[in-house]
Each structure stands twice: as structure tokens, then as C-alpha cells.
Image (spheres, grey):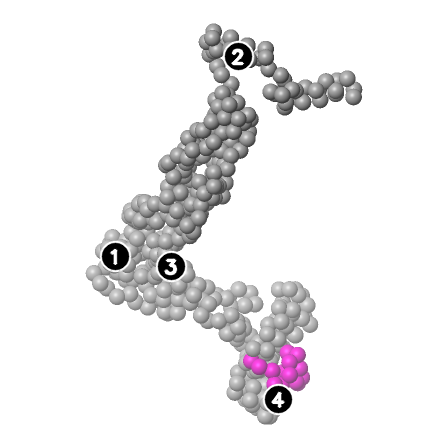
């Protein structure tokens, strides 16, 4: 047994709280752990010393005895002889591996193992990819989906036992749900591989599900899709995943939304983009056209005289719905001026007459300016 002051070993004061003592020990344990210092006897001794000290100071009664009597409180109890000569290293024949496992449980919580076991028995989450139209995304909809899932067995109601037989205590872990195994220097606890953390086993398994408490069958769920949903949106339906093992909680269903490509509209956030062909005469003279909208209706749009291809018109509040809002995005219409095709003789004559009396500079300023720049480039100006 070390004769150094126990508080000094951990580097804390005598008034240190239990939490401060735990943190100090954990810091030393990480620093001098044999796995981090292979072959270093000094580090191994410091690691063992810190563990021995923590074994005393974590116990309120042992700590009170040490605070009152010092090392003398333990010198008479070690192996039945002063100094504990027959007890081996440590305090009172201290079993290093098992005690360290107990300390590990205390530091990281015995409940952790139980939570891990419960998590292992919880039903798995399920992903479902659902494709909808852009119109359905705009209006919102409710649709039924069907999928195969490990559901609660109807024969045993999820217990896994036949004819209502009750589960018995697992013989591997003796009902604890966890088993200990020696791994070199440490004793490690794991979820029992026989009962998977349940602490119980079934002598007479259900013939339908063979003791699993679950059977695979089709499930039908209504999925409510909110208006304004975007591509890639995830909708969570609690408890609609796989059933848990032997009555444990079910997993969740995650529906991922994929929006089908639209023939006319392109979506960007809450805005809608559309490319509309416009007759040359309408673009030149001006006019009014009807434009289709995502809500299934149409909107009148004025075309100013002289409209060029590529020009965008903005129609306010004609775009997509916005989730959890009464607002809407905008719609942007790109003009695509269409050149006449399959001209009749009369149409050709009229166009030729128009060309003969046209002024390129005033009627086609963009093309005139472009070719002037090209001419200047060629001439070296």
C-alpha cells in the first residue's frame, strides 16, 4: 500500500467532491494506462496506485475512515496482518481486474449497458423513397404506401413463447442481460449473445415466429405530405418501423420525398421557372398571352413590343407553396421568340417588303451593334 497521501496521488484537495475525484482518477487512468505505455513498469505502477486510491476515496465509508485515521485505518485489515504482507499489492488483497470493471461501471454508468441492450432490442428504422409530382408537392397530399416489415407476431403477440408460456431467466447471463469476459488486463462486459440483453430466454418458442416475436408481413401506412415540400425532404412516422424484439419499442419510418421532373416547369426553392415560345409578330408588335401556372390555372401576361428572346417576366405569387406558410414564391417566364417557318408566297413577299424598308440601326440595334464590333475587330481598331 502506498504511504503517500491519497489525495496527493490523485492531485485533489481533501475537500474535493466525488465528481472531482472521479475526474482526477479518470485523467490519470488515461495517462498511465498500460495499453498506452507498453512495457513501462513505472506507468503501470502509477496506474495501479491511482486505481487503488480511487477504490478507497470513491467509497464514502472508506474515505471517512481514511480522513480520520489515515493509513492506519487499513493497515490492520490487509490479509489479517499489519501492512497486509500476505495480501499482495494493493489494499486488502485487491482484485485489480474485477475492481477496475466495477469502477468502469460506476464511471460510465451501469445504466449504459441496459440502455445499449434496450437499443439492441428496439425495432430497426426503415427508409422509404416516395416519388411525387410537382403538383402534389404544390398542393400537398395524403398517400398510402405499402412495405414489408418485421411486425409483431400475431400468434404469440410478440412474446416469442408458444401457448402463453412465460420466458425464463437466461442461463448464460443469469438474468443480467450482460456477460463478462477477460481480455488481457481487463474484464469487459458485453451484451449477452444468448438473450441479446433481455435477460430471459424461451424454452418453448412460438412455432410461427420461432421465438423471435416477429414475423415479416406487409404494412400499409398513410403518409401526409405537406404543401410546399421540397425534393429530399424527410418525413418521420414514429413507431411505423420494425417491431421491437419481444415487446420492445418499434423503430420509425423515414419517408424521403423525390419530386418527379416536370414537362413544363423547373423549380428552384419556392420559385418556378418556365420557358414560353412567343410568335415573332407578338414579340415585335406586343400583345397578351396566357401562361400556364403550377396551381392548374393560367395567368395573362403582357408582352411589350420589341420583346427579345431570353427576356424574363416575373409573375408575383405564382410560384410554389411555402411549407408552414400561406405565402407563395414567384414564377419567372423566359420568352423564346419563334422565327416563322413554312412561309406562304404572300408571307414571304410581305417579309421581303418589310426587309427592304427596314433600317438595321433602328429596327435591329443589337445585331447592328454586334457586327460593327466585329468589323472594328477585323480592321484592327
Q: Is residue 10 rendered magenta in the image?
A: yes
Q: Earlier in the sequence, mark 2 or mark 3?
A: 3
**Residue 316 seen in the figure:** yes
Distance between the Cα atoms at labels 2 and 1? 88 Å
Residue tagged by mark 3?
A: 122
Q: Secondary structure at mark 1?
A: loop
| Lateral position of residue 347 relative to residue 167, left or right | right
Magenta region: 1-18
User: Mark 2 touching mark 3, by CB under 8 A?
Assistant: no
* Mark 3 surroundings: few (<14), some (14-19) or many (≥20) residues within 10 A: many
Q: Between label 3 and label 4, give the one nearer the viewer.
A: 3
In the picture, measured across the screen, residue 369 lies left or right of residue 273, that is right
Instruction: Please name which of the two marks, 2 or 3, marks the residue nearer to the observer.
Output: 2
> Is tag 4's residue or tag 1's residue first in the polypeptide sequence?
4
Which residue carries the number 1 mark?
206
Q: What's the CA distance linking mark 4 and mark 1?
A: 60 Å
- Residue at image point 49% right, 20% down: 281
Viewer-proximal residue, 263 or 326? 326
Quadrant assignment for the C terminus: top right
Which is nearer the N-term, disc 4 or disc 2?
Answer: 4
Nearest-to-viewer mark from 4 and 2: 2
Callout 2: 10 Å neighbours few (<14), some, many (20+)? Answer: few
Amino acid at each position: 500500500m502506498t504511504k503517500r497521501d491519497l489525495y496527493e496521488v490523485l492531485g485533489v484537495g481533501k475537500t474535493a467532491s466525488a465528481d472531482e475525484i472521479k475526474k482526477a482518477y479518470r485523467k490519470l487512468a488515461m495517462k498511465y494506462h498500460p495499453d498506452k505505455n507498453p512495457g513501462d513498469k513505472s506507468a503501470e505502477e502509477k496506474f495501479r496506485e491511482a486505481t487503488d486510491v480511487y477504490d478507497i476515496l470513491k467509497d464514502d465509508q472508506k474515505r471517512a475512515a481514511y480522513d480520520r485515521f489515515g493509513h492506519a485505518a487499513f493497515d490492520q485489515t490487509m490479509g489479517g496482518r499489519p501492512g497486509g504482507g500476505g495480501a499482495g499489492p494493493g489494499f486488502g488483497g485487491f482484485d485489480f481486474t474485477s475492481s477496475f470493471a466495477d469502477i468502469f461501471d460506476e464511471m460510465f454508468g451501469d445504466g449504459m449497458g441496459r440502455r445499449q441492450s434496450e437499443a439492441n432490442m428496439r425495432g430497426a428504422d426503415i427508409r422509404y423513397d416516395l416519388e411525387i409530382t410537382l403538383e402534389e408537392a404544390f398542393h400537398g397530399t395524403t398517400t398510402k404506401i405499402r412495405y414489408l416489415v418485421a411486425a409483431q407476431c400475431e400468434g404469440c403477440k410478440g412474446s416469442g413463447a408458444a401457448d402463453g408460456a412465460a420466458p425464463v431467466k437466461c442461463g448464460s447471463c443469469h438474468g443480467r442481460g450482460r456477460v463478462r469476459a477477460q481480455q488481457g488486463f481487463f474484464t469487459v462486459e458485453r451484451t449477452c449473445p444468448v438473450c441479446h440483453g433481455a435477460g430471459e430466454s424461451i424454452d418453448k418458442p412460438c412455432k410461427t415466429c420461432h421465438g423471435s416475436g416477429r414475423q415479416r408481413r406487409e404494412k400499409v401506412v398513410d403518409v401526409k405530405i405537406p404543401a410546399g415540400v421540397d425534393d429530399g425532404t424527410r418525413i418521420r412516422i414514429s413507431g411505423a418501423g420494425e417491431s421491437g424484439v419481444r415487446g420492445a419499442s418499434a423503430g420509425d419510418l423515414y419517408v424521403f420525398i423525390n419530386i418527379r421532373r416536370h414537362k413544363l416547369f423547373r423549380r428552384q426553392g419556392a420559385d418556378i421557372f418556365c420557358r414560353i415560345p412567343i410568335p415573332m409578330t407578338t414579340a415585335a408588335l406586343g400583345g397578351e398571352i396566357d401562361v400556364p401556372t403550377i396551381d392548374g390555372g393560367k395567368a395573362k401576361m403582357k408582352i411589350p413590343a420589341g420583346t427579345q428572346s431570353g427576356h424574363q417576366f416575373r409573375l408575383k405569387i405564382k410560384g410554389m407553396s411555402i411549407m408552414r406558410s400561406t405565402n407563395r414564391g414567384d414564377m419567372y417566364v423566359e420568352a423564346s421568340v419563334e422565327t416563322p417557318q413554312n412561309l406562304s408566297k404572300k408571307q414571304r413577299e410581305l417579309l421581303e417588303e418589310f426587309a427592304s424598308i427596314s433600317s438595321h440601326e433602328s429596327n435591329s440595334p443589337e445585331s447592328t451593334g454586334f457586327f460593327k464590333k466585329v468589323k472594328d475587330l477585323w480592321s484592327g481598331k
